[in-house]
Image (tube, rainbow, N blue to C red):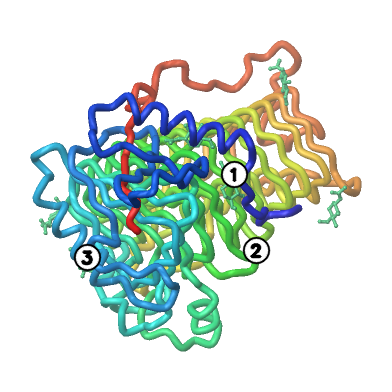
Amino acid sequence: MELQRRRSISLPQILATWLLLMAAYTGPAECIRRTSRFHGEDEGDGSGAVEAFKYSATACRAHTASLEDFGGVGDGATSNTEAFSAAVTHLSQFASDGGGMLFVPAGRWLTGPFNLTSSFTLFLHRDAVILATQDMNAWPIIDPLPSYGRGRDAAGGRYSSLIGGSNLTDVIITGDNGTIDGQGAFWWSKFHGHKLKYTRGYLIELMHSDQIFISNLTLLNSPSWNIHPVYSSNIVVSGITILAPVHSPNTDGINPDSCSNVRIEDCYIVSGDDCVAIKSGWDEYGIAYGMPSQHIVIRRLTCISPTSAVIALGSEMSGGIQDVRAEDITAINSESGVRIKTAVGRGAYVKDVYVRRMYLSTMKWVFWMTGNYKSHPDDKFDPNAIPVVDGISYSEVTAYNVTMAARLEGIPNAPFTGICISNVTVELRKARKLPWYCADVEGVSSGVSPAACASLADQGDGAQPCPFPTDASPMDDVQLQECTYVKAISA
Ligand SMILES: *[C@@H]1O[C@H](CO)[C@@H](O)[C@H](O)[C@H]1NC(C)=O
Ligand SMILES: *[C@@H]1O[C@H](CO)[C@@H](O)[C@H](O)[C@H]1NC(C)=O
Ligand SMILES: *[C@@H]1O[C@H](CO)[C@@H](O)[C@H](O)[C@H]1NC(C)=O
Ligand SMILES: *[C@@H]1O[C@H](CO)[C@@H](O)[C@H](O)[C@H]1NC(C)=O
Ligand SMILES: *[C@@H]1O[C@H](CO)[C@@H](O)[C@H](O)[C@H]1NC(C)=O
Ligand SMILES: *[C@@H]1O[C@H](CO)[C@@H](O)[C@H](O)[C@H]1NC(C)=O
């Protein structure tokens, strides 16, 4: 598969741009006089040229600025950390006055980590690349997440994320499929060489924030996870392409962590770890923090993850995970479809998980549940903190070229319950005596081929399919607005 197509300008794109400009002409702005950049006219005075960009987002902004206005240099070599930071600071004054948008023009914008602000849009031109610096000193060290107690790569602090933000409301990160490149190879080799004193940064992390909209971007080579909303709510992630080498360490795609009301849709993810992983804190730290991930919708996800899951729940789930709905999931060459990972010491629960319409090809396991996931932040975890896994429904699944249909392992004396599997056809690569392996799980099945294990009692033909909720989920009615940004072309 060709993953990195060359961009070339097609006739429809030229027409679309031209139409946008015509639309811009109807606006009141007097400065819109010339469009020579688009159709070759030259009016000779060299002033007043504009470009117009249209995008849809949860909010448009009254105030705009371009990174170049703050001394940004898009040569791929000059650091723009100061420019990003100055631009965000400048635009933050408009948070209660219509909001601010920062435009990142075509170019390669090297930068260290920077934070966003409230009522703010970061918009990338289609040929803009935000390049993460490989100068480790440019990455501030921040505290570990309270619900994890420590960093995941190393005890103690962690590098901040490339694009961050805390305690924000109404944040948009979008573009016309512009790129954020984490240049992660540098970090992966430090990780493999055990040379990291602190945990690697993520590409995008928003903490304690509300109303987050991330769309139409390509994310490349994150040092670690790509998109990490944590302790946040009302989040849409839409139309994101995430690419990382399939053997890069922990390059998870989208990880909602102790988040409520999340909609992830139309994403294409190739990565070295889970494409989507829902989390909520680690052992005693996550239990104490007590913030669940809930009301999460995932739809039209396409995933390639040869060493991990298409959708993982856990392993850090100590604040609880509840009400997850996933549908229209396509995956090829992935280790498992949906995977629940937990362990004694995690506490809390994973419940009310509904998955339907998965189309999978070349998989090790279609379904995988693990009750003894061996990783703990330290040895202070509570051996009596037994996680509950209950109410897990999978239906309408077709899978080809599969090694084993399922590996379902609950916790001895604390079985995973309420598992329902219906209308599932798995075509095994090689016939097996035991295509399903089950231990410490309880539930029902119907219309499953090859037949599920006895602990998922076959309800026979005519059984009700496994449930999928019919009520609306909280993010279904998010309204998008059509925004236009008109930029004067500098000489
Ligand atoms: C994202 O891009 C798609 C086409 O690739 C377009 O249909 C959609 O409207 C865009 N979304 C936003 C939010 O701009
Ligand atoms: C971003 O904000 C966080 C939390 O307020 C802070 O710890 C961090 O240092 C900030 N990062 C930068 C690059 O300013
Ligand atoms: C951010 O929000 C969290 C949770 O509400 C709060 O504990 C923290 O003090 C806030 N931080 C700042 C800098 O306001
Ligand atoms: C965005 O760019 C990526 C990488 O070039 C490409 O694979 C993807 O198809 C593009 N998405 C859209 C909607 O154009
Ligand atoms: C089936 O899976 C095997 C092992 O992963 C792989 O080598 C082979 O190419 C796959 N076949 C097809 C037809 O996808
Ligand atoms: C069973 O699942 C297949 C897709 O895997 C779907 O086409 C079919 O309509 C489903 N049948 C029922 C009865 O839901």
Which of marks 3 and 1 precedes in the sequence? 3
**Mark in front: 2 vs 3:** 3
**Residue type marked 1:** Val
The residue sitting at the top extreme is 462
Which quadrant of the figure has residue 462?
A: top right
Image spot of residue 345 (x, y percent): 39, 60
- Can the viewer see residue 349? no
Q: Is residue 123 left or right of residue 350?
A: left
Asked if disc 3 is less than 8 Å from ligand 2, the answer is: yes
Residue under circle 3? 85
**Are discs 2 and 3 less than 8 Å apart at CB?**
no
Q: CA distance from mark 2 to mark 3?
A: 33 Å
**Real-space Cα distance between discs 1 and 3?**
39 Å
Mark 1: C-beta under 8 Å from nearest atom of ligand 6: no
SS at circle 2: loop
Q: Is residue 70 left or right of residue 410?
A: left
For label 2, the residue is 246
Quarter of image, res 198: bottom left
- Residue 314 at x, y percent in the picture: 46, 52
Residue kind at label 3, given as amino acid type: Ser
Q: Residues within 10 Å of mark 2 (few under 14, many from 20)?
A: some
Of marks 1 and 3, the one in the foreground? 3
**Quarter that holds the C terminus:** bottom left
Disc 1 target residue: 338
Give the secondary structure at mark 3. Answer: helix
